[in-house]
Amino acid sequence: MLLTKKSEYAMLSLVVIAKSEVPLNADILSVRLNISKSFLAKILQNLAKHDILKSYKGVNGGFLLLKKPEELTILNIISIAEEKKPAVFECSNGEQICGQGVSRGCTIFPVLANLQFKINDFLQGLTLKDIM
């Protein structure tokens, strides 16, 4: 599946954080977005680990964006949130991923690969700023 709750929650959180001038923590974000705090905290920590967010500790701690919203592509956000390249179909990201090992003779692989390329290109051209 292309987008899971991880991707959705990552994008929603980043939109809220991008609009804030002060760090927002997982407690505040989970209430504001009606998302499980523990699930959201893992997503936020992963985004911080990949230098999308800066994490601040302490009473007034939380997360702020490290980059401008126009510098963050949706493809990059999804790839980090999902911890893998997004794929419409299991095999669509390359012949070597073919679960059946028959991609060279597969009649639908070129169509799936082309669709994946178009989706990746679209998501690469779309930024956090565009969805704010």
Image (cartoon, rainbow, N blue to C red):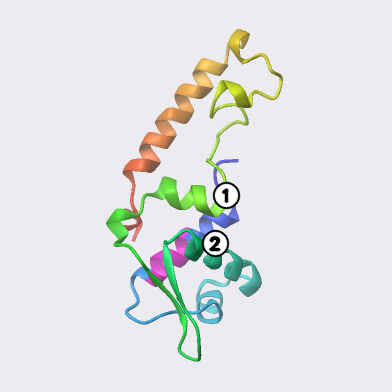
Between disc 1 and disc 2, whose residue precedes?
A: 2
Kindly indicate whether the residue at mark 2 contacts the one at mark 1 (C-beta within 8 angstroms). Answer: yes
Percent of width and height locating residue 106: 61, 12
Q: CA distance from mark 1 to mark 2?
A: 9 Å
**48, above or below 6, in the image:** below
Q: Residue at x 33, y 51 (%)?
A: 127
Percent of width and height locating residue 78: 49, 49
**120, above or below 68, in the image:** above
Tag of residue 83:
1
Percent of width and height locating residue 33: 52, 71
SS at mark 1 in the image: loop
Q: Residue at x 71, y 19 (%)?
A: 100
Percent of width and height locating residue 43: 56, 63
Quarter of the N terminus within the rendering: top right
Q: Main secondary structure of the magenta part?
A: helix
Magenta stretch in the rendered image: 11-17
- In the visual, does 41 lie left or right of 54? right
